[in-house]
Image (tube, rainbow, N blue to C red):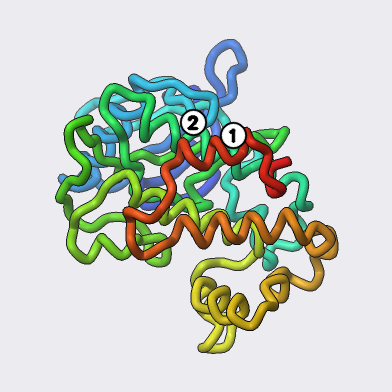
Amino acid sequence: MSFATAKFSTRLGTGGFGVVYKGELKGGTMVTVKRLENTGQGRIEEFLAEVNTLGNRHHINLVKLIGFYVAKSHRILVYEYMSKGSLDKWIFHGNSSFYLDWKTRKKIVPDITKGLAYIHGDCRQRIAHLDVKPQNILVVDAFNAKISDFGLSKLINRDESEVVTRMRGTLGYLAPEWQHARISVKTDIYSFGIVVLEVVTGRMILDYSQPDSDVCLLKLLNKIRMESRLMDIIELQNVDVQQHFEEVNAMILLGIWCVNEDHTRRPSMNSVVKLEEDKIPAFD
C-alpha cells in the first residue's frame, strides 16, 4: 500500500476519518486512499460500517470501494479516484475560481437523488447515510456526482420504520428528529434538502460571515419567501443562475419540501426521482 501511494506522499486532505491520499495501483489505476488516524472504538466502528455498507453494494452514484487493508493498528480504505474532489469546493460563492454554471448545478442534484434512492429502497436492508453534505458528495470530470463516506451510516430492517441511535452527523444538516434519537431514511431527506438549497444558492447552510440575522440559510429563505423575493438569495455575481428563474424556483421549493420539520411530510427519494423523470422545470 505504501507503494501505491508513493509512501503516502500525495496528500489530498484530512477528514474526520483520517488522512486522504491519492494513489496509483499496479497497472496505472488511480485510487483514493483513506488511512485511519485514530484507532479508538468509535473510529473502528466507522471503518467497519464503511466496509460493510459499500463493500457489498454497487451503484453508479455511490463511490466504489475497491478494497481495504487491516493489520495491527493500520486501517486503510481504497476507493475509485474522484478527479474533481468534493462538491463543496465547487458550489459555494467563496470559491469563485470553481464556481459552477446552472446547467452543471442542476445536473448534480439528480445524481445525489438516485444514489440515495438506491440505498433507501433498493438494498436488502435500507441504509440511512446520516451524514449527507457537500463534503461527502464527490465529483468526476463530467461532474457526475457520487455519495461517499458511509462511516456514520445505519442499516434499517425492512420491517422497521425508525431506529434509535446516538446522534451523529454534521451541524446544520441534522434533522429535528435527532433530538429524540429516533431516525429513519427520512433523516437523510432533510440533509439532502439542505444540500439542494446550498447547490442552488451558493450559500452554506451556516455562514458566520453573514450578519447575525442571515447566518442560517433556512431562516433567510423563509424570510424572503414570505416577502415574495426568493431570487434575492441567488448570489449577484452568478448571472447565469439568475437567468433561470423558473428552474431555480422549482429547485428551491424542492429543497424546502425536503426540510419539513415533520419527517412524515418529507418526500421519499423515489418520489423525487419520479419528479425528475416527469421533467419538472428544475430537471428538464
Determine if residue 50 is in view: yes
User: SS class of the residue under badge 2?
Assistant: loop
The span from disc 1 to disc 2 (Cα, nearest Å) is: 8 Å
Callout 1: 10 Å neighbours few (<14), some, many (20+)? Answer: many
- At label 2, which amino acid type do we have? Val
Q: Which mark is residue 63?
A: 2
Callout 2: 10 Å neighbours few (<14), some, many (20+)? Answer: many
| Residue 62 at x, y percent in the picture | 48, 31
Q: Give 127 or 253, whichever is nearer the viewer.
A: 253
Left or right: 241 as drawn, with respect to 269: right
Please name the residue shown 71% across and 48% down the image.
281
- List the residue tagged with mark 1: 82
| Residue 228 at x, y percent in the picture | 67, 78
Please name the residue shown 69% across and 77% down the image.
229
> Compared with residue 284, is residue 168 higher up or lower down, i.e. above or below?
below
| Residue 158 at x, y percent in the picture | 22, 30
| Residue 83 at x, y percent in the picture | 64, 35
- At label 1, which amino acid type do we have? Met
Residue 74, quarter of the rendered image: top left
